[in-house]
């Protein structure tokens, strides 16, 4: 820890801007509402102890421990937000992208500490999203878990579902992880059949989004209802219904691809 701190604080990187993650979330400047903070000044002012750092082009992502209390941090003009809540509050796309990337790095850096082959503690590479094992020389990179999402349309209605871990009242499109050996399209058909008992056709690619809570890569589709009656699995899904434009439930945050997918139907059914 001391070595990282001494090395980057005593070099040109001290003048760079950084995003700081504590165990409680991301540090944000109260006045600017920005997570981009001057690296050396913030470390000194908030007495942060750096445990890990990564240079992402011109910005440093920093994992650190805080000594000061929340009140002391607030008195210095900063606030600590939960990463997901903060991401959901960001309007600007470039800042969203940056926080997604920084959060993904943080999750990976925190979870992957030891070589999966020999158990040796891994060493971080400062200017690459890479960790190395000094004993067996293996390199490790951030993990992405591909998943699909699909919005099913039937005439003027869309199928939305909710799982138990959603906030009360919130419904979203059907989603699930892609299985080994499976294409994204096959995963759509399987997930829809498994979760709500329906069959779909006319798949149309919509877009994708990295979602680092913890490490998904979401590939979103639109599809047309083909046949079947709603029959929820009762496991992953606790309710699913057809909704029309005048009768929509609460939706996921505006920053999520699920919301963009649903809004594409609202704007152009
Ligand atoms: Zn190893």
Image (cartoon, rainbow, N blue to C red):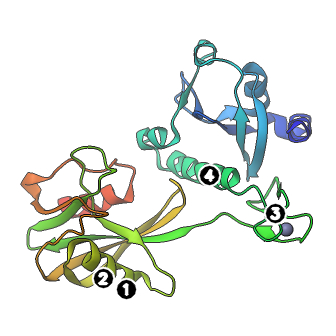
Q: Is residue 32 left or right of 60 when viewed as pictured?
A: left
* In this rendering, the label closer to the viewer, 3 or 2: 3
Mark 1 burial class by Cα count in 10 Å: few <14, some 14-19, many 20+: few
Find residue 33 and name its label: none
Which quadrant does the N terminus fall into? Answer: top right
Q: Position of residue 39 (x, y in %)?
A: 75, 33
Q: Position of residue 108 (x, y in %)?
A: 65, 56
Residue at the image point whose x is 71% and y is 57% from the top? 112
Find residue 119 and name its label: 3
How far apart in space, not on screen, are marks 3 and 2 (Cα)? 39 Å
Residues at badges 3 and 2 in contact (C-beta under 8 Å)? no
Is the residue 264 above or below the residue 4 in the image?
below
How far apart in space, not on screen, are marks 2 and 4 (Cα)? 30 Å
Precedes in sequence: disc 3 or disc 2 = 3
Residue at the image point whose x is 14% and y is 53% from the top? 248
Q: Is residue 8 left or right of 189 when viewed as pictured?
A: right
The image quadrant that residue 115 belongs to is bottom right
How far apart in space, not on screen, are marks 1 and 3 (Cα)? 36 Å
Q: Position of residue 133 (x, y in %)?
A: 86, 64
Q: Of 19 and 213, which appears nearest the observer?
A: 213
Is the residue 70 above or below the residue 121 in the image?
above
The residue labelled by disc 1 is 186
Precedes in sequence: disc 2 or disc 4 = 4
Residue at the image point whose x is 47% and y is 43% from the top? 84
Secondary structure found at label 3: loop
């Amino acid at each position: 820890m001391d070595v990282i701190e001494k090395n980057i604080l005593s070099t040109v990187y001290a003048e760079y801007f950084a995003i700081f993650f504590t165990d409680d979330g991301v540090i944000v400047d109260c006045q600017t509402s920005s997570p981009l903070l001057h690296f050396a000044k913030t470390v000194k002012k908030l007495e942060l102890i750096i445990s890990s750092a990564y240079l992402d082009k011109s910005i440093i992502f920093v994992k650190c421990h805080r000594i000061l209390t929340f009140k002391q941090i607030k008195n210095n003009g900063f606030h600590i937000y939960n990463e997901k809540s903060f991401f959901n509050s960001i309007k600007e796309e470039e800042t969203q992208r940056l926080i997604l990337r920084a959060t993904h790095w943080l999750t990976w850096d925190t979870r992957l500490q030891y070589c999966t082959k020999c158990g040796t503690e891994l060493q971080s590479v400062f200017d690459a999203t890479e960790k190395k094992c000094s004993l067996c020389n293996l390199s490790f990179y951030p993990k992405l878990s591909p998943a699909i999402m699909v919005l099913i349309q039937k005439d003027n209605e869309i199928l939305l579902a909710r799982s138990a871990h959603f906030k009360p009242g919130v419904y979203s499109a059907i989603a699930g992880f892609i299985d080994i050996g499976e294409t994204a399209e096959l995963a759509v058909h399987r997930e829809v059949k498994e979760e709500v008992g329906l069959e779909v056709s006319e798949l149309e690619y919509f877009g994708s989004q990295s979602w680092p809570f913890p490490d998904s890569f979401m590939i979103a589709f639109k599809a047309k209802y083909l046949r079947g009656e709603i029959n929820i699995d009762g496991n992953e899904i606790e309710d699913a219904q057809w909704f029309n434009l005048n009768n929509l439930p609460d939706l996921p945050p505006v920053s999520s691809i699920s919301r963009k997918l649903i809004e594409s139907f609202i704007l152009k059914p």
